[in-house]
Amino acid sequence: MSIAASECLTTNPLLELADLFADKIVQVDQLLKKRAYSVIPALPLVSSHIIESGGKRIRPLLTLAAARLCGYTEGDRDIRLAACIEFLHTATLLHDDVIDESPLRRGKPTAQHIWGNQMSILTGDFLFAKLFELLVEDGALDVLKLMVEASQKIIEGEVLQLGTKAKSFVSKEDYFTIIEAKTAVLFGAALELGALAANASSEQINALRVYAHNIGMAFQLIDDMLDYTADEPVLGKQIGNDFFEGQVTLPIIILYEKIETNPKLLEKLTAVITNLDRSKVDFQWVRGLLIQANVFSVIEKNAYNFAEQAREALSVFKNSSLKKTLIDLTYFVVNRCN
Amino acid sequence: MSIAASECLTTNPLLELADLFADKIVQVDQLLKKRAYSVIPALPLVSSHIIESGGKRIRPLLTLAAARLCGYTEGDRDIRLAACIEFLHTATLLHDDVIDESPLRRGKPTAQHIWGNQMSILTGDFLFAKLFELLVEDGALDVLKLMVEASQKIIEGEVLQLGTKAKSFVSKEDYFTIIEAKTAVLFGAALELGALAANASSEQINALRVYAHNIGMAFQLIDDMLDYTADEPVLGKQIGNDFFEGQVTLPIIILYEKIETNPKLLEKLTAVITNLDRSKVDFQWVRGLLIQANVFSVIEKNAYNFAEQAREALSVFKNSSLKKTLIDLTYFVVNRCN
C-alpha cells in the first residue's frame, strides 16, 4: 500500500481536458502521423511506435487549454502548435531511451530495445527536424525562439543529470534545475505556445509561464517521491527506478540533511548511494530511512507550495470551467498516487 | 602505391580558399566557440573536441566563397551562416560516431570513445539547437527552411544507408541517394547559404545549387573509390573502412554488374559481402576483382561527368580568380589521392 494512499486524488482533471478537446486531439494525432511520414519507411515505422505508444498527450492538451483560456476559438494554429510540442517530447524520449538504455517505457518495449541505438537516434533527429519544419511553416519567430530555448534547457538539464549519477552529494539547486528541465520547461513551452496561438497579452503569457513552471515542478517532485512511496499496482510500474538507475533525487538529498549529525549512518548511506550495484534490500533500507526521517512530508510541503503558486498565477484570468479544471490540476498533481 | 597515383592532383584549391578567407574563418571559429558555450561545462567540453578536431572547414569555406562570388562584401552575415553549416556538420558527426561506434575520426579518438554515447548524443542535440538559435536570430525563414530540409535529407540518407549494410544487392539509385545525403546536401546548403547571405538572384542560387550537388557527388564517388585504391600514407588513414563496416558502395555495385554472367564468382562475392565478419584476405580478394574488372575507371568516368556539370553550372558567373578556384576544385575532387 502507498504511504500516502489515504490522501490520493483519483479524479484526474487531465481526463476532463481530454474530453473537452477530444476532437482537436484527434486532429493533433492525425497531423503527427502525417508529418512523421518519410520516403524511407523505417522512419515513420519507428516514429509511430513512440507517437502511438499510449502517452496521455498531456503537453498538447496544455497547449490547447492555454489557447482556449486566452480566447482562441477559430482556426487550427492551436492544433499545429500542439503537434509541435508533442514532436519535441517524442524526439527527446527517443534519445532518452538510448541514453538510459531502458528496455521498457509505459510497460512496452522501447524503440531502442526493438530497433537499436542507431534507429532511435536518427528517428529522434528526424522528429526534431520535423518539429522545426512545422515551426518554419508557422513562420512566427517568437514561437521558434521559444522552442529553441526550451530544447536547449532540456538538453542542458539532461547533461547535468548525467553528472549527478551515483553521487553522494547533489545540491538542491542542481536538483531543481534538473527537474525544471525535465518537466517544467516542456510544460511551460506547451502553455506558452497556446497563448501565442491566441495572440495573448504579455500579462496572460507571463501568468501561464508561472503556472506551467510551478505545476511542472510540483508534478516532478511528486513523481520522484512516488518512485519511493507508490503502491506498484496503482502506479502501473515498478517503484525504485530512480534508485536502481543511480539517480539522486530530492528524497535522498533531504535524507542527507536529516541525518547529517549521524556519521555512521551517513557513511553507510554514502556507501549505498555511490555504488551502482544496488540490491532490493538496499532499496528497502533507504526507503525505511526516508519514512523514519519524515522526508516525504517535506517533499509534499514543497510540492504544495509550487501548486499554490501555480493557482495564484491564474488569477489574471476570469473564472470559467476551463480555469477551474486548470486549478483542479494543481491539486491533482500533488495528491495523485500514480 | 595508389592505383591512380600517377594522375593525382596535389594542389588543393581548398587551401586557396582557406588563404583567401583566413580572417573570416578565424571569426567563424570564434563564433562557433562562443555559441557552443553552456552553463553546463560538459557541453562546451565535448563540442570543442569535435569543433576543434582539425576539420578543414570545407563547408564554411564554401559558404564564404558563394557569398563573395554573389557580390557579398560588407557585414558578417556570411560568417554567421558559415558557422551554421559547421554546427549542422559537427552535430551530425557526433551522432554518426555513436551510430558507427567509431573509435577514431581523423586519427583522433571520437567523442563517443572518450565520453560515451550519452554525451555524444546530447552534445549533438545541443549543437543542433544552437544551429537553430543562430538561424532564428538571423530571422530569415528561407534560410531556416533550407536548413530544415537539408537536415531531413541527411537523416533520411543515413537511415537508408543503415538498411543497405551487408546487403548483396544495393541499387544504384539508393547508392546515389545515400551519397547525395551524405555529402552533396550539406555542400549544397553551404553554397546556398552564401548566396542567400548575398541576396543573390534565383539564377545564381540555382547555379550554385547545381554546382554543389555535382561537386558533392563527384567528391563522394572518389571518396568511396579511394577507400579501395588509396595509398594509406597519402590518404592519412587505413583503407577498406567501408568494406570492413559492411557498407556497400559503388565499387561493389558495379562489380556485381561486371560479373553477372559468372555465377560461381557471384556466389563467392555474395558470401563475402553478406558476412559482416570480414578478413583482410577478403578485402584484398575483392580489391583484386575490382582492378581486374576495371571498375575504378567506370567510377572515375562517373565522377568526371559530375565535375563537368559542376563547371558548366558556374557559367552564369563572370570570370574572376574566385570562380577559377571553384572550377579548379572540380578538377581536384576527382583527381585527388586523399
Image (cartoon, coloured by chain):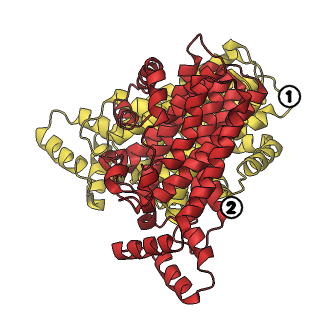
Chain colours: A yellow, B red
- Judge by depth and name the residue closer to the eye, A215 or A142: A142
Kindly identify which residue carries mark 1: A73
- Judge by depth and name the residue closer to the eye, B18 or A36: B18
From this viewpoint, which residue is outermost toward the left? A264
User: Which residue is painted at 72% across and 34% down in the image?
Assistant: B207
**Closer to the eye: label 1 or 2:** 2
Dot 1 amino acid type:
Thr
Mark 1 Cα shell of 10 Å, populated few (<14), some (14-19), many (≥20) = few
Residue B23 in the image, given as x and y percentages of width and height: 44, 17
Residue A142 in the image, given as x and y percentages of width and height: 67, 21
Q: Residue A263: tell me if it is visible.
A: yes
Residue B334 vertical placement versus B147 (above, below):
below
Quadrant of the rendering where the N terminus of chain B is positioned: bottom left
Name the secondary structure under disc 1: loop
Dot 2 amino acid type:
Glu
Chain under callout 1: A
From this viewpoint, which residue is outermost toward the bottom? B264
Chain under callout 2: B
Residue B173's tag is 2
Q: Are marks 1 and 2 on the same chain?
A: no
